[in-house]
């Protein structure tokens, strides 16, 4: 493939706790050779890196963006400039070991862009060998008011392969062969009876070898360390409405959980 989704990024004021959570529940691993814990903690599943960044003043917490590694960055920038003038980009500081450029799609959603085998790659972005762990990041989802156009944008720019949605599913699914970008239609009316969210990043998800075993592992982790306890989902009328919305918007998910800092995670079985 011309492009691969190579990382997902979270912002959290509990970033060290989240790193422990994703290692303990989903088997992700930190780098053996490179640590940058003052800036962030990065864990990997063998293919995708999960960047857990400390929250700073004025920056919202939660799922922040995703990153794409491509065969040729100038080709991507030329496609954006000629086909999608509302898309734009800036260069990142040289200290980022996973991306050289940050860009926005025509709806304002932000993504990182990196050249394959870029010189300043370090840590997980070198150590990920492409072989996914038994529990691996399989998709990242965003909400947009213009799903048709955004699906065309990511297909045109990154040559991601489109997969047909099941009957009645209004999402778009674009994949690099291992990780899928899910583009969900946004409507404020979806949030009747619950807290209203704007368009933007929605959730990311893991495919696992056994959904029930994940539930058992989570219970055991909470028993051993109560600080690992995720935020409960679906308790109360508003929370139940939000969970029901997530289930409608992500019909591929078998189960939803929250990480300890309110991040929404879809858990999918392999079959």
Image (cartoon, rainbow, N blue to C red):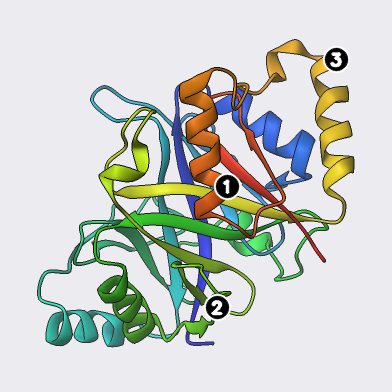
Mark 2 or mark 1, which is nearer the start of the sequence?
A: 2
> x and y percent of residue 121 in the render?
51, 62
Q: Whole-Å distance between the Cαs marked 1 and 2? A: 24 Å
Q: Residues within 10 Å of mark 2 (few under 14, many from 20)?
A: some
Mark 2 or mark 3, which is nearer the start of the sequence?
A: 2
Mark 3 or mark 1, which is nearer the start of the sequence?
A: 3
Report the residue marked by disc 1.
247
88 vs 229, nearest the viewer:
229
Side of 211 relative to 162 (left or right): right
Q: Is residue 117 visible?
A: no
Report the residue marked by disc 2.
176
Residue at 16 percent across and 78 percent down: it is 84
Report the residue marked by disc 3.
223
Judged from the image, the secondary structure of the residue bearing numbered disc 1 is: helix
131 vs 193, nearest the viewer:
193
Judged from the image, the secondary structure of the residue bearing numbered disc 2 is: loop
Find the residue positioned furthest to the left.
Answer: 85
120 vs 90, nearest the viewer:
90
> x and y percent of residue 237 in the render?
50, 21
Q: Is residue 108 visible?
A: yes
Report if the CB atoms under discs 1 and 3 are less than 8 Å apart. no
Report if the CB atoms under discs 3 and 2 are less than 8 Å apart. no
> x and y percent of residue 153 in the render?
29, 78
Number of labelled discs?
Answer: 3
Q: Residues within 10 Å of mark 1 (few under 14, many from 20)?
A: some
Q: In this picture, is 41 found above or below 32?
A: above
Side of 102 relative to 258 (left or right): left
């Amino acid at each position: 493939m011309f492009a691969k989704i190579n990382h997902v990024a979270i912002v959290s004021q509990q970033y060290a706790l989240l790193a422990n959570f994703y290692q303990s529940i989903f088997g992700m691993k930190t780098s053996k050779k490179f640590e940058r814990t003052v800036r962030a903690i990065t864990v990997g599943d063998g293919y995708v890196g999960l960047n857990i960044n400390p929250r700073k003043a004025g920056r919202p917490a939660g799922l922040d963006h995703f990153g794409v590694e491509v065969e040729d960055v100038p080709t991507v920038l030329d496609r954006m400039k000629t086909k999608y003038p509302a898309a734009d980009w800036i260069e990142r500081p040289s200290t980022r070991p996973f991306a050289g450029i940050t860009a926005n799609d025509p709806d304002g959603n932000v993504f990182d862009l990196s050249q394959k085998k870029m010189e300043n790659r370090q840590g997980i972005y070198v150590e990920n060998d492409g072989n996914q762990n038994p529990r691996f990041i399989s998709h990242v989802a965003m909400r947009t008011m213009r799903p048709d156009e955004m699906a065309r944008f990511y297909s045109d720019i990154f040559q991601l392969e489109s997969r047909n949605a099941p009957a009645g599913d209004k999402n778009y699914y674009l994949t690099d062969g291992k990780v899928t970008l899910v583009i969900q239609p946004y409507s404020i009316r979806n949030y009747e009876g619950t807290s209203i969210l704007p368009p933007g990043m929605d959730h990311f998800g893991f495919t696992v070898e056994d959904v029930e075993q994940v539930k058992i592992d989570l219970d055991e982790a909470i028993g051993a360390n109560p600080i690992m306890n995720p935020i409960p989902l679906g308790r109360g009328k508003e929370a139940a409405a939000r969970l029901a919305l997530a289930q409608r918007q992500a019909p591929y998910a078998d189960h939803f959980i929250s990480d300890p800092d309110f991040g929404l995670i879809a858990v999918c079985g392999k079959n």
